[in-house]
Amino acid sequence: MFVATFAGVAALSLALATHAAVPAFDSVRAAHVPSERLIHDRYGAVIHHIRSDDKVRRTRWVTLDEASPALIEAVLASEDKRFFEHGGVDLRAAAAAVITNLRQGGVVRGASSISMQVAAMMDRTLARAADGRSVQQKIDQAQAAWSLESTWTKQQILETYLNSVFFRGEIQGVGAAAEVLFGKAPHGLNATESAVLAALIRAPQAPRATVERRACEVMRGLDARADCAQIAYVMDRWGSAGNLRDQGEMIAPHLARLLPAPATQSSIDRDLQLAARDAIAKHLQQLGGRNAHDAAVVVIDNASGEVLSYVGSSGRLSAAGEVDAARSPRQAGSTLKPFIYGLGIEQNLFTAATLLDDSPFSVDVGGGAYTPQNYAHEYVGPVSVRTALASSLNVPAIRALTLVGVAPAHALLRRAGLSTLINDPDHYGFSLALGSADVTLLDLTNAYRAIANGGKWSSPIFTCRSGATATSVCPNESGRGEAAPTKVTRLFSENTAWLLADMLSDRGARYVTFGFDNPLALSHWAAVKTGTSKDMRDNWSVGFNAHVTVGVWVGNASGAPMHNVTGITGAGPIWADVMEAAAAKLGTSRFRDPPAGLVKRRVQFTADEGRIEATRDEWFVRGTEPATTLVAVREAQGVGARITAPTDGTIVALDPDIPAGRQMIQLASGDSARAGCWQVNDTSLGCATLPVRWSPQPGDHVIRLLDSAGTELDRVLLTVRGQRR
């Protein structure tokens, strides 16, 4: 052993004769990958950490300028006193080690310089075995150190060393050591902490007493009067040092899972993220004993689709804080009504001034009758579409759905990105208007964004895009905004989208159900819709201003019902706080001007008895405005120039045992004097005052009701299944 050690030292001069291949410093630095991915907001602030390597813990590369001078001094004193003097191998230290080892009768002192250690880190063949390095390894290590010194600067070698050495367990590099053990950045390490880290380099897993003794030796070697009593205090804090880490950075756990790797720059606005988190905590605690424990908030930039805030749970207030409620399917409640009314306006079936009858009625659902009721079990009689939507009345919404059809409404909602509507339209039936379908908060908020965005839908994104938005565009690593192609789907015309926004922002029309004093009235223009599902298991508030769309869900991840918590009392106050925070950050402005395709007319509402709604100015799609100022009550279901049979979305199954000529479908008009002409697909069936019988063929069919001039007044979709004999 002793002869081998001495021979290794003697052979060092031979090792200097040959240059080994040395990787470039920049390539070594570029290969250094942190074990945690830091997620930044759009302005560069850290909002979350994601552990990407569970075998080691290391931070980003730490430059010498970012390391404490005390740390550098302690490491050099402990590992390589003449680092800046030798050329890669400290022959004086090697000779001293040989003499010491000979006197002690064993290997008690090493002589590897920092350059030699770095060379060994980059070449696995130089790794130290359990019984030490062989003579040949010593020669090769010395040769590699000499080559390294001839290629790299001393600063580059020392910087690589500080980022590569292990300190304790899985901790690699001074960045992770300072953060995990002391809760500090490496530039903040004091002399005592630096001595402890220097002592750990020699034996990372050494017992505490050994570490304390070696740290004291380092301190006393630098200053004979150093107070070693501080070492015990520093090490006592190891158990709690991790708590010193800024937990304010960990504010987007659910968003971090959605951000595509290896992206680190998100579209999130840290201020809005904190505002949403704080609003959830504030209002859930105010709900007290009403059994409401979970909530989620999504904020999306209207123009770009960038997600500015994504809070998936109420965190510590919830027993299921890890559940991402923003992507969990829940019953939609009344939040789907705007899309049903929008479809009717788009098809010219009604206008914002059309009067629908809010009174008890039933619709045939094939084998039974469906009888909807309003939330308060009260009815207001004839009511305009504007008031019915803004006040979230159930019966008029069902009447509207019977006019537009369940199948077309279902198709529209699917185009709006509500991917959780996985069942056929007939599975939901007319209850679709009242939110029987499951949706996610993220999808629903983005669907409302389409209304705010002039009827155009595109996918939400979690990284930044180039181009002008309501917020500052964040740069990616190259300093440019990410330009990602986005598919745009038009749900509504600009006319329809503007009308929906106008109705949803109308505080006066909201009065019937919510009164004037409610959380939905903000300091600036905003459109909003609330919703509450069956048994108060979910409630929602989704709406937008000129810049952002905000969606809020409140409920329980377990599905347990809340106690007397609705969209107004649960999600509404959270929505209002987040909207106000967004307005304070991004500014406020009125919504866009009405499109050229809209006209304003004065209307007054008539009925057999009394006044229905106050006379007002109303907006109409050009060509649908009334000929006079009077608006009358719409005919009851089954009356008027509408198709009364078959019901829209009906599925007919042909019976193979019945002759084809005996299987007929009756087509009936509610007012054959005004409209009694029929067309199936492109085939005319003629005109008649009595119902027409049609022989169905397998496939999907469009049945149209026309007046005598050939103008279409109504249509339904029909599916025929089976085969003709």
Image (cartoon, rainbow, N blue to C red):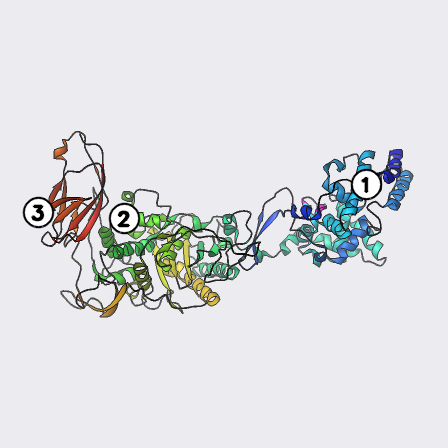
Of label 3 and label 1, which has the lower sequence position?
1
Say which quarter of the image contains residue 202: top right
As displayed, is residue 304 above or below residue 427? below
Spatial CA distance of label 1 from label 2 is: 78 Å
Left/right placement of residue 227 relative to residue 405 reads right
Q: x and y percent of residue 146 in the render? A: 81, 44
What residue is shown with label 1? Answer: 142
Q: x and y percent of residue 625 in the render? A: 21, 64
Spatial CA distance of label 3 from label 1 is: 105 Å
Secondary element under disc 3, as helix, strand or loop, is: loop
Left/right placement of residue 546 relative to residue 113 reads left
Crowding near the residue tagged with mark 2, few <14, some 14–19, many ≥20 C-alpha atoms within 10 Å: some
Crowding near the residue tagged with mark 1, few <14, some 14–19, many ≥20 C-alpha atoms within 10 Å: many
Secondary element under disc 2, as helix, strand or loop, is: helix
What residue is shown with label 3? Answer: 690
Camera-side residue of 344 and 338 = 344
As displayed, is residue 143 above or below residue 163? above
Spatial CA distance of label 3 from label 2 is: 28 Å
Q: Amino acid at mark 1?
A: Ala
**Quadrant including the C terminus:** top left
What residue is shown with label 2? Answer: 408
Magenta span of residues: 164-170
Total marks placed: 3
